[in-house]
Image (tube, rainbow, N blue to C red):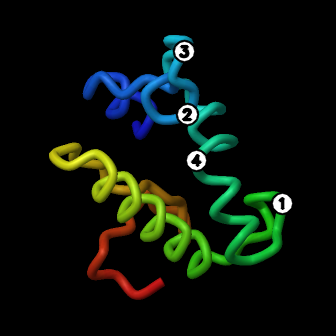
Amino acid sequence: MLADTLNAAGLDQRKVLKPSVSIPWTQEAAKEQLWRPIQEAMFEKTSTTELSMGEVGRVEEVLVRHLEEKFVGIEIPEWPHYEDGEFERITSSTEP
């Protein structure tokens, strides 16, 4: 959903990462270029499978804050997650 939101806002990878080439976002690119560097800096964990739900929420908060500050006006979709057999959404009011 993040990849679709960035593409719809006209924020391809060129605008966010590489100014000379227009590269549309994919789910994998968003994970590797945006999510993983924050995850590794915060928790020194390379795999998302190593993160607790609280850590996922904290990475999400940092990523959303960064994108909203850098690209004013973009509305980042709520982050989905799977917990206790139910598909839920992490919101800023939920404790990680």
Mark nearer the N terminus (2 vs 1): 2
Q: Residue furthest left?
A: 73
Residue wearing tag 4: 34
Report the number of discs.
Answer: 4
Tag 3 secondary structure: loop
Estimate how packed mark 3 is, as few (under 14), some (14 to 19) or many (20 or more) residues with alpha carbons within 10 Å: few
Mark 2 is on which residue type? Answer: Leu
Judge left or right: residue 46 versus residue 87: right
Q: Which mark is residue 20?
A: 3
Tag 2 secondary structure: loop
Mark 3 is on which residue type? Answer: Ser
Q: Quadrant of residue 3?
A: top left
21, above or below 18, in the image: above
Estimate how packed mark 4 is, as few (under 14), some (14 to 19) or many (20 or more) residues with alpha carbons within 10 Å: some
The answer, for residue 89, to whether it is visible in the render is no
Q: Residue furthest front?
A: 20
Where residue 15 appears, as percent x and y from the top left, is 43, 28
Residue wearing tag 1: 46
Label 1 vs label 3: CA separation?
Answer: 29 Å
Estimate how packed mark 1 is, as few (under 14), some (14 to 19) or many (20 or more) residues with alpha carbons within 10 Å: few
Residue at the location (36% across, 23% down)? Answer: 7
Q: Quadrant of residue 2?
A: top left
Judge left or right: residue 67 versus residue 42: left
Residue wearing tag 2: 17
Mark nearer the N terminus (4 vs 1): 4
Mark nearer the N terminus (1 vs 3): 3
Q: Which mark is residue 61?
A: none
Estimate how packed mark 2 is, as few (under 14), some (14 to 19) or many (20 or more) residues with alpha carbons within 10 Å: some
